[in-house]
Image (cartoon, rainbow, N blue to C red):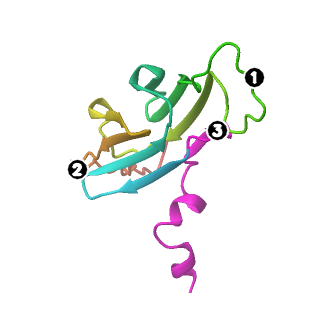
Amino acid sequence: MADGIFGHPFRRFFWSPPIFREWSGSTALMDWLESPTAHILKINVPGFNKDDIKVQIEEGNILQIKGEGGNGEPHEKDDVWLVAERGTGKRGFSREIELPENVKVDQIKGQVENGVLTIVVPKDTTPKSSKARNINITSKL
């Protein structure tokens, strides 16, 4: 039963390092899909174009995504807003995501289309050397 609850894909949330270092409470909602060859992130960024969005890698494997600006609703200077629940003007968002160790951070690609930012993070399929090593034990130090 525990395997069904805490098994893949939920194992990452309970036993791995945190996936999200920071969440700004922004409306940039995200889906994260893992395929055999890559991690694919899809983030809602309505009103933002590629020049408004900055994606970078920090501290080895932290993917930082920031959006500043974006297009506000067009309006005439004499218009008076009566209700503005969807936002009116400049806004921004910020997300920081800790990527797994088995990715090729130098080959990350991204594109914005129809208000969705898609980031593809290829997996590194080369086998890693074991981090375990034998320690020689002697009778005297």
In the image shown, does 12 or 70 lie closer to the viewer? 70
Q: Please provide percent x and percent y for residue 26.
A: 64, 38
The numbered dot on residue 80 is 1
The answer to whether any part of residue 100 appears in the image is no
Q: Quadrant of residue 119?
A: top left
- Per the model, the C-alpha gap separating discs 2 and 3 is 33 Å
First along the sequence among labels 2 and 1: 1
Residue at the right extreme?
A: 82
Mark 3 touching mark 1, by CB under 8 A?
no
In the image shown, does 94 or 59 lie closer to the viewer? 94
The answer to whether any part of residue 16 appears in the image is yes
Q: Quadrant of residue 54?
A: top left
Q: Nearer the viewer, mark 2 or mark 1?
A: 1
Q: Which image quadrant: the N terminus?
A: bottom right
Q: Residue 74, relative to residue 15: is it above or below?
A: above
Residue identified by numbered label 3: 26
Q: Nearer the viewer, mark 3 or mark 1?
A: 1
Residue beneath the point at 54% across and 55% down: 16
Q: Please provide percent x and percent y for residue 7.
A: 49, 73
In the image shown, does 41 or 83 lie closer to the viewer? 83
- Per the model, the C-alpha gap separating discs 3 and 1 is 26 Å
Left/right placement of residue 103 relative to residue 91 reads left
First along the sequence among labels 2 and 3: 3
| SS for callout 2 | loop
Residue beneath the point at 52% across and 81% down: 4
- Amino acid on which disc 2 is placed: Thr
Q: Examine the structure image and report whether residue 20 is included in the region drawn in magenta.
A: yes
- Amino acid on which disc 3 is placed: Ser
First along the sequence among labels 3 and 1: 3
Residue identified by numbered label 2: 125
Q: Which region is colored magenta?
A: 1-28
